[in-house]
């Protein structure tokens, strides 16, 4: 009678033959799927909006270099009150902008969860401001697009509303009696 014993060596070979290919396949999925989505135009959020503006209006955005470092410093300086800062600036932006089209483009590229809070358009459409917000955990994410004359600025930032209120209270105007004024 022959008996087959499972030895530690046999088990480790089985594990290597099973888990190594499985790990490689999962790693490929994690790397390849986002690349395919991005290549397919699935880019959204801040970069999606900026890239769409560049494409639609044939303009080049200047992204502020080392903004991630400024974001980290701002987070430290505000004790976590501000972070996730992204800034892009379009100088010499002279293309006519249709407010409805701009609003649709930004809504589409930002994606779900963002709500427009403000849409302001000057009488002749030369100046436009869009402000969107969405909850981001304990924080509030804000997206601001401001087209003013020949410049268009795009900013995204995350703020802690409680810390923001606390900071604002520090700088409230007080009347001569020391009472807060409205």
Image (cartoon, rainbow, N blue to C red):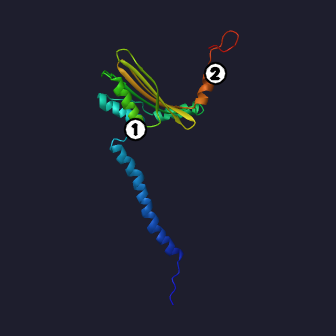
Q: Earlier in the sequence, mark 1 or mark 2?
A: 1
Please tell me in which quadrant of the rendered image residue 58 appears. top left
Q: Which residue is mark 2?
A: 170
User: Above or below — where is 31 with respect to 4?
Assistant: above
Q: Quadrant of the C terminus?
A: top right
Q: Residue at position x 51%, y 73% from top?
A: 11
Q: Which residue is mark 1?
A: 44
- Does dot 1 land on a helix, a strand or a loop? loop
Percent x, y for residue 180? 66, 15
Percent x, y for residue 90? 36, 26
Please tell me in which quadrant of the rendered image residue 101 appears. top left
User: Above or below — where is 95 with respect to 8?
Assistant: above
Q: Is residue 178 left or right of residue 22?
A: right
- Does dot 2 land on a helix, a strand or a loop? helix
Q: Residue at position x 39%, y 31% from top?
A: 106
Percent x, y for residue 57? 30, 28
Q: Is residue 174 left or right of residue 121?
A: right
């Amino acid at each position: 009678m022959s008996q087959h014993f499972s030895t530690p060596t046999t088990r480790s070979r089985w594990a290597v033959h099973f888990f190594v290919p499985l790990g490689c396949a999962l790693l490929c999925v994690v790397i390849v799927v986002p690349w395919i989505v991005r290549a397919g135009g699935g880019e959204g959020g801040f970069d999606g909006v900026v890239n769409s503006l560049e494409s639609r209006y044939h303009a080049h955005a200047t992204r502020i270099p080392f903004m991630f470092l400024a974001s980290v410093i701002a987070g430290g300086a505000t004790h976590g009150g501000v972070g996730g800062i992204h800034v892009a600036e379009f100088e010499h932006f002279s293309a006519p902008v249709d407010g409805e089209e701009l609003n649709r483009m930004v809504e589409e590229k930002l994606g779900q969860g963002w709500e427009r809070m403000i849409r302001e358009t000057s009488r002749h459409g030369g100046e436009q401001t869009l402000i969107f917000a969405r909850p981001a955990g304990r924080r509030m994410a804000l997206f601001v697009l401001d087209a003013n004359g020949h410049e268009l600025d795009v900013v995204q930032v995350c703020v802690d509303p409680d810390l923001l209120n606390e900071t604002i209270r520090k700088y409230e105007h007080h009347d001569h009696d020391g009472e807060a004024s409205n």
